[in-house]
Amino acid sequence: MLAELSAEKIKIEPAPSPAKIMQIGMGFWASQTMLTAVKLELFTLLAAGPLSEEEIKQKLDLHCSDRHVFDWLDALVSLAFLERRNLLQDAKYHNAADTDLFLDKKKKTYMGGILEMANNRLYGFWGGLAEGLKSGQPQNESKSNPHGNMEFFTQLYKDEEKLQEFMNAMSGIQMGNFMALVNQFDFSKYNSLLDLGGADGWLSIQVCLKHPSILCTTFDLPPVEPLAKRKINGFKLSDRIQVVSGDLLKDAIPKADLVSMGNILHGLSEESKQELVKKVYESLPAGGAFIAIENIIDNERRQNTFGLLMSLNMLIENGDAFDYTLNDFERWTKAAGFKRVELIPLAGPSSAAVAYK
């Protein structure tokens, strides 16, 4: 009987393994190993050239044993953030290529702002996920504030240093997305761009650097204005990028041919999402377009793990906010009057959802 069974008909099920359980369950070990390197500016230090363990220990003022410094550095090697020649006392450590590009604070491509915020803010708040799921309430700075959604900004705006850290984080998480968008979307068809919730103007800067004829307006709350002007001035683009202060949910928004939002819609309740989409539609001319740059979740809700986790982060931050699928976006935009939508894949788990009037 067994001889008659072909190899093709024999299905061998893989043995159950705890590997994934341990990798995810203890994932904060790897996370903190890398986040600590960002906090101590190890990658910025190594951008100048390879160093030994002893040199790193001295320059970063580390007082633990040599063995534990080696453990930290070699863990970063195993995680592919660092590369190494030789071993232990003979070793020289240097940045991996992507680490050097994106985690050296002295480079304009630095995206560590989002990681700094993750370490300084989000890491502790995520310990409240179970409570957030039970209560539906934010677990951040606004936890004890009765005003709820997005109230944590009130705390951030009281401290310019913390606000700058948040702006750096937003620029960091969108760095690759904005660079991809300016190359994939034809901005030359439009004379003007309005970036709602534009933070420090990073998207407007990227658009102007790539497309010399378009004029941009970056729109955000008043405390952000000096930060945006400072960054825009640094790129000598003040003649092409206007900074306007206001509340995008309460105030009239400037007119433009094209309206964009980077990680704005996901921070709102569904009712507020719909209201804002309608407001954008009414502000646009015929032939105008609306771009939402987000971690758009796949319609089957199986693939974009980062987008799903970001949606849980919105529970932590705002309570009733959430990330969404392209089907969700199409439903809201068509209800507002937009004719069609498309999805433009950007960097990593992010995409641009575009609605055309």
Image (cartoon, rainbow, N blue to C red):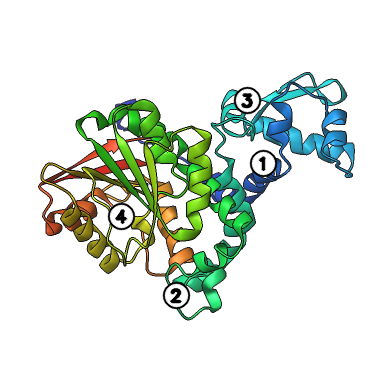
Instruction: Say if 147 sits above or below 331 in the image.
Output: below
Residue 264 x %, y %: 37, 55
Quadrant location of residue 81? top right
Residue 172 visible at all? no
211 on left or right of 206: left
Q: Secondary structure at mark 3?
A: loop
Mark 1 to mark 3: distance in Å? 14 Å
Residue 301 x %, y %: 31, 51
* Residue marked by disc 2: 148
Q: Which mark is residue 324?
A: 4
Judge the density around disc 2: few (<14), some (14-19), many (≥20) Cα neighbours within 10 Å: some
Q: Which mark is residue 96?
A: 3
Mark 3 to mark 4: distance in Å? 34 Å
For discs 1 and 4, the disc positioned in front in the rendered view: 1
Q: Secondary structure at mark 4?
A: loop
Q: Are marks 1 and 4 in contact (CB under 8 Å)?
A: no
**Which callout, 3 or 4, points at the residue further toward the start of the chain?**
3
**Which callout, 2 or 4, points at the residue further toward the start of the chain?**
2
Residue at image position (75%, 38%) is 72
Mark 2 to mark 1: distance in Å? 31 Å
* Residue marked by disc 1: 38
The kind of residue on which mark 1 rests is Val
